[in-house]
Structures are given as structure tokens and as C-alpha cells.
Image (cartoon, rainbow, N blue to C red):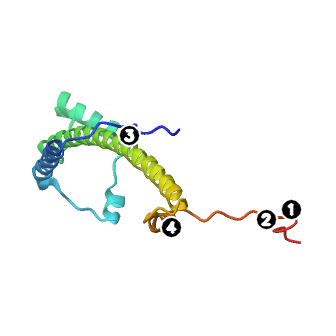
Amino acid sequence: MPITNLNNVHLSNDQVETAKNALSLLESSLQEININLSADDRQKYGSINEQNKLFVNKVYDFHRNQPELEASEVDWSEYERDFISRQNYENLIARLESLTTKLKNAKILHDFDNYQAALTDYAFTAYKAGTAASGYEIKQNELKQFFAPVAKMPSKPSEGINK
């Protein structure tokens, strides 16, 4: 017997609406920074790698602790705002990615449960169609399109062998 109902936790309609409203609020609060980059722009500007993040952090440390050594050509107030924004976005992204993973995990279990129940229903439909119960043959014909046809085995060992 297959394992079913791996996830029996379901959000209420109120919880779904609250989550949707929270997402709408989040989307509107982040609207100001909503910038669409083209694929070329993403490639051109890209995300700085870990080594370069360490470099940016070290320059920030020098700026904060030994400002007499900083280049006058850099707008340091903008540098600080960018630095803080980077940290804020990175923290938000990490939380959102964690939430996304949790939602995907829950969805996977519900998908599995639905598929197992659908297979059970299909097996029952095939059984009932075999008994000529009314309506089941039509249902079976509609559902069997989702399954690949089974290859027939040759009846004699020599059949199906290329000579």
C-alpha cells in the first residue's frame, strides 16, 4: 500500500488571503527598487563573487576606521547607502529564499498526495469499467491518455529480434 497523505496541514482561506495581502504589501513597499534588467545587463553588471564581496567589505572597513586613507573621488555617503542597501537586500533575499523553499517542500508533498490519490481513483475506475458499470469506461478512456502505452512483448523468443 503506498504511503499517502504526507502533508495534512492546509492553510485556511483566511491564511491564504493574509499571505496574499502580505505579499502585495511587500511588492508595493519594494516597488521603488523594482528595476528590470535585461539578460545582457545582468551579464554585464552581474553579481559580485565572494572574493569581491570581501574586497568591498574591506574597503568599507577602511572607510569607517581610517577615513584619512580614502580616495576623495569616491562619494562615500553614497558608498555607505549602497553598502547598507546591499546588506538589507541580502537579508531579505535569504529570508524569501528560505520561505520559498518551505513553500516548495509543502507543495511537493501535496502534489505527491494528489498524484497517489489520482492513481487510486484511476485503478478504481479501471476496475469499475471492467465490470461494465455505467460511465466508468468513458472516464477510463479520458484518463488513460495520461499513461504511455505499454510495449507488447513478443509471443515467441525469436519475434522482435532483428536478423
> Are discs 1 and 2 less than 8 Å apart at CB?
yes
The answer to which quarter of the image holds residue 60 is: top left
The CA distance from mark 3 to mark 1 is: 61 Å
User: Amino acid type of disc 2?
Assistant: Pro
- The residue lying at 49 percent from left, 57 percent from top is 128
Q: Nearer the viewer, residue 31 or 87?
A: 31
Residue carrying label 4: 145
Residue carrying label 2: 154
Q: Is residue 71 visible?
A: no
Please state the horizontal and vertical placement of residue 2, each as a whole percent of the image: 51, 40
Please state the horizontal and vertical placement of residue 15, each as a whole percent of the image: 16, 41
Camera-nearest label, 2 or 3: 2
Q: Is residue 120 visible?
A: yes
Residue carrying label 1: 157
Label 3: how many Cα within 10 Å (few below 14, some 14–19, many 20+) = few
Please state the horizontal and vertical placement of residue 72, each as a whole percent of the image: 16, 44
